[in-house]
């Protein structure tokens, strides 16, 4: 059985998402025929083309320059930097105009960017202006998500089903000419889907849905295949089903797909591709006699160390393009540059944080690869992609495994750059950090959460503020950039504690040991320890709407004597200024106005 694995829209376009290269390699290693396609990238390439810009009612100047902008952002013509670094080379919409206004107001000179990076920044804002026009055309559109609002807090499938039916009216022939504006992106996506089906002629299509902002696109692809090739079987998997669809009972989604799999996708997908009987399915939902049924043969997961290296054939590696929208070198890593994504270990080496999904396989089942295996993967991927940059996408890079990996990288003399998520914990010693830098580590991200020892202890984070500061200092001294994930609105967190946390962030940034940070509002998820024992954290669970589809974030009641929305805005405004080297002399409470 031939399987086509698809990445749906929309994800960051600078590098392939990790799922299909890993699963394609796995299926092939087990004797299956497998190919892959990135329709998220293809849809954005369709948008950012001269022909398509005509649909957005933009001035002809946009279409005249878009081809050169894309070539530059795809690193095909670096010489264009001289042209695009100058004002006037690009038509100015809201994002470009605002950037120039800020430069004039603050005199930042784009934070001293060299000509090449200045040009990348301006070209990225030019694409943001086009994306702004696209969002006016189709309110579902977002640069790295599509119809995310429809998939957030979605206990009932009816809302998204209604939206899917609304976009599906008419036949393709009728919609080609004079297509209603709100259907334009879906028409493009359907055309791209048709091309892939015609090209590969698969019997099975597997679509990964890593985030809520990919669900609508994934189901649109699936619906198109059901319309044109009803004989093709369709599988849905990935991060969104793993966290949101574990209690699925609504059969309506199976009008679009045939299978929904949970957790590690290797065995579930293989058994379906092999044409196994339902009793042999692994962690798989199907519809039987009009009702949802879950099958799990209990077969143990594939050991992470035994996986083959990812493969990239079928993905147009020379057409991925980077975006440098925010003037922060750490934030830039997510959206700019080519990074080969690898996982050192399945699961989390800590897996005890009370706010985290610690009851789900992707967190609670820790299964590391050996350092030698990881280096074998890295060497294979470098040959396949021509890129020596790596993003290790682990939940948290295990210190012991990191130590062994760095030793192996240095022993083999690999010339690589890499970054990933860590824990700011004592095991990340000064010696290990020095070894990481020598082995190619350029940046790390990690959770400082509330930046308050009382609440850090309450959430069982396993770090202290002083200990994290020591780790950050050692990282900065080694030349490794740092980014912190921060949290506000945690149960029992007071306003004073929140702004004490902001004061810590202010000091760390002013001292130059924390380079980037972002505040997230606490969300209670159904699979966390806090949801299982809410009374321990001073909250009560509120009634939920039950509709048989998605369940993840759940409502709760807590005692907060301040406006969480206003506090969140103050925290983000302060940190934005700190990242740009300003506002350090403003008392932290003054950001609240």
Image: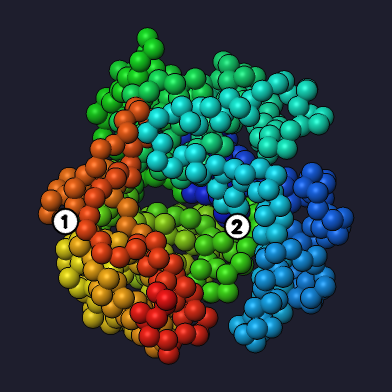
Residue at (70% x, 59% y) in the render: 129
Q: In which quadrant is the C terminus drawn?
A: bottom left
What number is the disc on residue 537?
1
Task: Look at the numbered disc 1 and give the secondary structure of its residue.
Answer: helix
Residue 93 placed where, x, y %? 74, 63
Residue 336 placed where, x, y %? 59, 64
Residue 247 placed where, x, y %? 30, 31
User: Which class describes the residues within 10 Å of circle 2: few (<14), some (14-19), or many (20+)?
Assistant: many
Residue at (35% x, 71% y) in the render: 407
Task: Look at the numbered disc 2 and give the secondary structure of its residue.
Answer: loop
What number is the disc on residue 355?
none
Residue at (38% x, 23% y) in the render: 250
- Find disc 2 in the rendering and name its residue: 14
Q: Nearer the viewer, residue 145 or 571?
A: 571
Residue 73 in the image: above or below residue 477:
above
- Give the spatial CA distance, label 1 vs label 2: 40 Å
User: Which class describes the residues within 10 Å of circle 1: few (<14), some (14-19), or many (20+)?
Assistant: some
Q: Quadrant of residue 376?
A: bottom left
User: Considering only order in the chain, which callout, 2 or 1, is on the residue closer to the N terminus?
Assistant: 2
Q: Quadrant of residue 349?
A: bottom left
In the image, farthest residue toward the left: 536
Q: Nearer the viewer, mark 1 or mark 2?
A: 1
In the image, farthest residue toward the top: 289
Confirm whether residue 368 shows in the render: no
Confirm whether residue 147 shows in the render: yes
Q: Quadrant of residue 85?
A: bottom right
Q: In the shown orientation, is residue 541 left or right of residue 522?
A: left
């Amino acid at each position: 059985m031939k399987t086509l694995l698809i990445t749906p829209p929309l994800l960051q376009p600078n590098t392939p998402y990790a799922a299909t290269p890993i699963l394609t390699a796995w299926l092939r290693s087990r004797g299956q025929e497998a190919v892959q396609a990135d329709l998220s990238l293809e849809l954005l390439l369709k948008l950012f083309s001269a022909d398509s810009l005509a649909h957005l009612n933009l001035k002809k100047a946009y279409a005249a320059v878009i081809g050169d902008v894309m070539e530059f952002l795809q690193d095909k013509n670096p010489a264009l930097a001289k042209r695009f670094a100058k004002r006037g080379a690009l038509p100015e919409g809201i994002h470009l105009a605002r950037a120039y206004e800020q430069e004039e107001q603050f005199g930042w000179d784009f934070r001293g960017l060299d000509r090449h990076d200045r040009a990348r920044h301006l070209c990225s804002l030019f694409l943001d202006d086009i994306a702004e026009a696209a969002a006016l055309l189709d309110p579902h559109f977002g640069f790295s998500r599509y119809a995310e609002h429809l998939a957030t807090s979605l206990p009932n499938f009816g809302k998204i089903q209604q939206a899917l039916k609304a976009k599906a009216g008419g036949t393709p022939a009728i919609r080609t000419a004079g297509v209603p504006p709100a259907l334009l992106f879906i028409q493009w996506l359907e055309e791209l889907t048709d091309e892939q089906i015609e090209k590969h002629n698969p019997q099975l299509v597997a679509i990964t849905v890593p985030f809520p902002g990919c669900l609508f696109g994934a189901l649109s692809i699936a619906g198109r295949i059901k319309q044109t090739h009803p004989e093709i079987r369709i599988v849905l998997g990935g991060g969104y089903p793993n966290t949101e669809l574990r209690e699925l009972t609504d059969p309506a989604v199976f009008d679009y797909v045939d299978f929904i799999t949970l957790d590690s996708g290797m065995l579930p997908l293989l058994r379906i591709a092999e044409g196994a009987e339902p009793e042999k399915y692994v962690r798989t939902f199907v519809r039987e006699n009009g009702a949802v049924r879950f099958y799990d043969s209990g077969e143990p997961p594939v050991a992470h160390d035994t996986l083959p290296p990812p493969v990239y054939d079928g993905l147009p590696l020379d057409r991925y393009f980077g975006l440098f929208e925010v003037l922060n070198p750490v934030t830039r890593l997510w959206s700019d540059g080519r990074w080969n994504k690898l996982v050192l270990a399945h699961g989390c080496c800590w897996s005890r944080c009370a706010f985290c999904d610690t009851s789900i396989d992707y967190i609670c089942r820790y299964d590391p690869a050996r350092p030698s295996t990881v280096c074998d993967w890295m060497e294979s991927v470098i040959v396949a992609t021509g890129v020596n940059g790596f993003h290790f996408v682990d939940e948290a890079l295990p210190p012991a495994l990191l130590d062994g990996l760095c030793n192996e990288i240095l022993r083999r003399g690999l010339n690589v750059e890499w970054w990933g998520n860590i824990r700011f914990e004592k095991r990340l010693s000064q010696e290990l950090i020095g070894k990481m830098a020598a082995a190619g580590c350029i940046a790390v991200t990690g959770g400082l959460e509330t930046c308050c020892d009382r609440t850090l202890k309450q959430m069982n984070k396993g770090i202290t503020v002083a200990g994290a500061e020591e780790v950050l200092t050692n990282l900065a001294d080694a030349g490794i950039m740092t980014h912190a994930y921060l949290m506000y609105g945690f149960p029992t967190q007071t306003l004073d504690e929140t702004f004490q946390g902001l004061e810590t962030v202010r000091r760390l940034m002013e001292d130059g040991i924390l380079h980037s940070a972002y505040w997230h509002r606490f969300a209670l998820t159904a699979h966390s320890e806090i949801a299982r024992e809410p009374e321990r954290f001073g909250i009560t669970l509120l009634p939920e709407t039950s509709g048989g589809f998605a369940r993840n974030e759940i409502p709760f009641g807590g005692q907060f004597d301040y406006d969480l929305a206003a506090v969140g805005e103050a925290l983000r405004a302060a940190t934005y200024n700190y990242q740009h080297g300003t506002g350090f002399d403003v008392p932290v409470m003054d950001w609240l106005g």
